Amino acid sequence: MNISAASKAAGIPSKTVRYYADIGLVPAPFRSESGYRIYDGSTVRKLVFVRRAREFGFSIGDCRELLDLYEDLNRSSADVKRLATKRLQEIARKQRELQLLHDELALLVDACHGDHRPDCPIIDGLSDRPTDA
Amino acid sequence: MNISAASKAAGIPSKTVRYYADIGLVPAPFRSESGYRIYDGSTVRKLVFVRRAREFGFSIGDCRELLDLYEDLNRSSADVKRLATKRLQEIARKQRELQLLHDELALLVDACHGDHRPDCPIIDGLSDRPTDA
DNA sequence: TCTTGACCTTCCAGTTACTGGAAACATTAA
DNA sequence: TTAATGTTTCCAGTAACTGGAAGGTCAAGA
């Protein structure tokens, strides 16, 4: 599996796949005789995990910690479980905030009659005229 | 309402609040005689909206479009409704992906007995040895 | 009134996490 | 064998902040 196949499988550009190995986020892949990177399923799965975590605002440092869970889970189980649980709570918080964002936008869409009538309660609430706050 | 109050209200650092006006993402605030920025509730509400959108991976460009919805909703309603609906679908997709991330991490946590027993089915599946893929 | 400390200003440089492009070597298909 | 495509390294550029310097402002207290 060379880099473009791994890139496709993980949903991450080749450039970024290289970068993630350069900074040691994922293990550096083996090389073919001619120097081509050769990826295995294990690394690809990590890349997928990183992509999803990055999409939701976890930093590279966070990803490093999250990936360490994979390696360390059976070692210092208690500490690691606490860390993972903290991250789970963060994800749950993100889910709630995402729901708020969704609802706010859905409200806009619902309030919009899709024609040219000028009365829109949402616009009234968010226009530039000075308000209560 | 000066910049630190607006910063607190919106949950965004003062630096970033200034930056968002510099790049024209939110309207440039009025100034006091001495040059201090003066914020109103309307702009603060936009800043909150931007913060939430940014936290979920919408780019500054995306935020610009989203904010335009507020201004343009009662104008070209049909087009704008289509754009908003597209964004809603994206948010829904993000929610599903976030759920996957959550489940994956929850699986790790559940599988971890919090002690030092060495058998962990998740680790087995994600270890560095070559796998099926 | 003066001063002290917190807050504000602009400007410019640095950071994070990529991302694009050049130059050169490798592989494959015709 | 040659053309197209894929890969390599290296270095520079971008997006979106973020930190720090140098200096002006404001409100409270001696």
Image: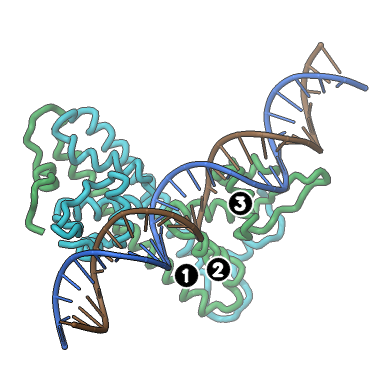
Chain colours: A cyan, B green, C blue, D brown
Tell me the quadrant of the picture where the C terminus of chain B can be found: bottom left
Looking at the image, tell me whether mark 1 or mark 2 is earlier in sequence order.
2
Tell me whether the residue at label 1 lies in contact with that at label 2, contact meaning CB atoms closer than 8 angstroms.
Answer: yes
Q: Chain of mark 1?
A: B
Q: Is residue B98 visible?
A: no
Q: Position of residue C4 (x, y in %)?
A: 75, 19
Q: Dot 3 corresponds to which residue?
A: B19
Q: Dot 2 corresponds to which residue?
A: B69
Q: Is residue A21 left or right of residue D28?
A: left
Looking at the image, tell me whether mark 3 or mark 2 is earlier in sequence order.
3
Residues indicated by labels 1 and 2 sit on the same polypeptide chain = yes
Q: Position of residue B96 (x, y in %)?
A: 29, 59
Residues indicated by labels 3 and 2 sit on the same polypeptide chain = yes
Which residue is located at x 26 percent, y 37 percent?
A: A84
Q: Nearer the viewer, residue B46 or B117?
A: B117
Q: Nearer the viewer, residue A70 or D26?
A: A70
> Mark 3 or 1, which is nearer the eye?
3
Q: Chain of mark 3?
A: B
Question: Residue C21, located in which quarter of the rendered image?
Answer: bottom left
Which residue is located at x 29 percent, y 57 percent?
A: B97
Asked if A43 appears above or below A1 in the picture, the reply is: above
Residues indicated by labels 3 and 1 sit on the same polypeptide chain = yes
Q: Is residue B127 visible?
A: yes
Q: Dot 1 corresponds to which residue?
A: B84
Give the CA distance from mark 3 to mark 1: 26 Å
Q: Amino acid at mark 1?
A: Ala
